[in-house]
Amino acid sequence: MLEALIHGLTNVLNPAIIPWVLFAVFIGLAVGILPGLGGAATTAILLPIIYGMDPTFALTFLIALHAAVSQGGVVTSILFGVPGETVTVASMLDGYPMAKNGEAGRALGASQMASMVGAIFGGIVLACLIPIARPVIMAFGSPEMFMMAILGISFVAVLGHGSPIKAIIAGGFGIMLSFVGFHSGTGELRYTADITYFWEGFQIVPVFMGLFAIPEVIDLMLHGGTIAKVEAANVGWKDVKEGCKDVFRNWKLVLRCSAMGTALGLIPGVGTNVSQFICYGHAKQSSKHPELFGYGNVEGVIGPESGNNAKENGGLFTALAFGLPTGAGIVMILAALMVLGVKPGQEMLTKHLDLFWTLAFSLILGNIIASLGCLIMARQLARLTLIRGVFLVPIIILLVILGAYGVANNIYDVYLAFFFGGLGVLMKTYDYARVTFTIGFVLGDFVERYFLVSLSSLGPSFLLQSPIALALLFLTIVGLASRGIKGLYVRFFQRLVAKEEEGD
Amino acid sequence: MRRGSLIFTGAFFLCSLVLLKATWAYSFKAKMFPMITLIIIMILLVVTLFQEGSTVLKTPETKESEKFGIPHVIVVAWMAGTVFMLWILGFMGTVLLLPFLYLRFQRESWLVSLAISLGCGLFFYGVFGFALRMPLYPGWLLSKIFA
């Protein structure tokens, strides 16, 4: 194994391959920064280029590109509140408020450093996983997946700020929205109002773009000024460095979220959308200042970013070792493997272990180069938040239109984004948490599908038959109860202090 | 503001009633989860309606007109106009016209407005239309002309 590992590392550090990696990172960053063209679509467009190429070169190129896309996506999410990629929506929830508070440099520094650390951590975990991965992955059946989603949904109760009842209502409506279209269990059409467009359900990007980007554009139109709402916006190197330091100050959170990301990445079917929100929810739940989440807490950027990139390592492992795709981007990598005549499966861990390591190192190297590139450019990028809103408004609207349209080249997706934009404005005005709405939307269908599969295959007592599912149930209950206990504890001491002050 | 929130919550309640009615028609497997979700939502909505209703009755309403005024109407008009422009002129028409009209509306100079809209046109067409060959939406007008 050590020999294969060294061989993989030498392959990636081959001077002939480095220009390809740099080129891939450049394309990946550009694709990530521009909304509308996802990493999977770009890989699909570039597939013809790799025909006839050396498999090591071709796959390194594609994997480095795949790695760089999410790094670029976070830039637009933080600076403009427009998710460049769906994988960077959770980072936007606190990254964009940080930019508005004049901390764009710090947010970019933190996001890129967290991504880099997450990717390296994921790579190390990957190395340790090889001997034990198969039984772990095989242990995850439908009851475990169901409980995993329930764990994610339970964050709805803690993620909203303001009224918790309204946060749960918003989460419930998000779940209802995920039911639109074909029912995976029976094939029945639900809530489509006989409109063909609704048959496939709602796309994530138009919904998210509408809910988050359009209200910000409207805010910019109404109040003018710049995105950074403070007079002296911090866009210097010092602030980028501060963001990087934040990652090391919160090293425990980075490690926890990276571990969670890698674990979630290993499991097929748990999309990045799910894992980023689970990491975001965990960051909030474990934070000393959960009340600052949504208003620009750097932990809200560090958590999902470290989880996101670590997840890619887990996803790559499952794809290469079992041929199971864990996301759209990985599907394209698998397609490329087949185009190049490399068969994913057990042989990757035995016969082609050197290629496996080459790909794993390409992913880590791609992430490192992309992060360094973004960190170097962070100061200049952060200055974009100081451009007058008058110039940014039409450009952001065009990016929203293109982002929503680019998912399926369907103009109705753009109309949908504007509809959700209106809903987003109302939800923001009347204190209905948009974050919990999106979590419900992402996880709703997932929960229902795995619940029905578990019920039909194992019966009503399916939870009792799986120790892992029971452990996850225990974690969910502990998570919810700890929140309640923490609240009671804080209130108790607040009253005590108030009484003492009255006594004085 | 509080009245607005009450109306919005009421709209959510009506929406959930409509969804509940639609849910009845589905098979047991297809309606079980939505039904559970809707019942929870409706209970919480009733609680919220009572809470907000009692607040509206107890406290005098602040001037809502201060919150929503002509600037909001203008913004809504811009958004509706953008959607209409996209439908009629397609993506490239909107890319060229929207920045120009918006910048002129904001009293930027002719030169700046023209330069930015042309820059946007070149950038968006260059990257998405030319380099990436994304099929950009042509719009109703162009479809009619070339039909």
Image (spheres, coloured by chain):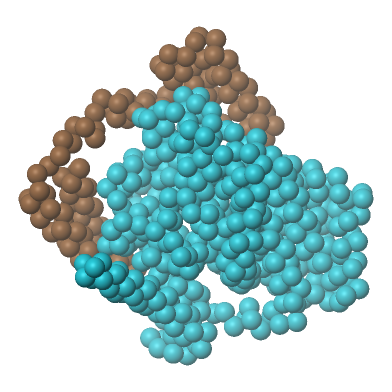
Where does the N terminus of chain A fall, quadrant-wise? bottom right
Q: Quadrant of residue A49?
A: top right
| Residue under the point 36% across and 66% down | A157
In the displayed structure, B56 sits above or below A411; it is below
Could you say where residue B85 lies in the image, as x and y percent from the top left? Answer: 42, 24
Chain A: colour as depicted: cyan
Q: Nearer the viewer, residue A339 or A252?
A: A252
Quadrant assignment, res B128:
top right
Q: Residue at x 29, y 51 (%)?
A: A431
Foreground of the two, B137 or B124: B124
Would residue A366 appear left or right of A233 to someone viewing this image?
A: right
Q: Is residue A307 left or right of residue A337?
A: left
Q: Nearer the viewer, residue B49 or A418?
A: B49
What shade does chain B have?
brown
Task: Tell me the quadrant of the picture where the C terminus of chain A can be found.
Answer: bottom left
Where residue A295 sits: x, y (%)?
43, 50
Q: How many marks?
A: 0
The residue shown at (50%, 29%) is: A392
Q: Is residue A406 left or right of residue A223?
A: right
Q: Is residue A154 visible?
A: yes
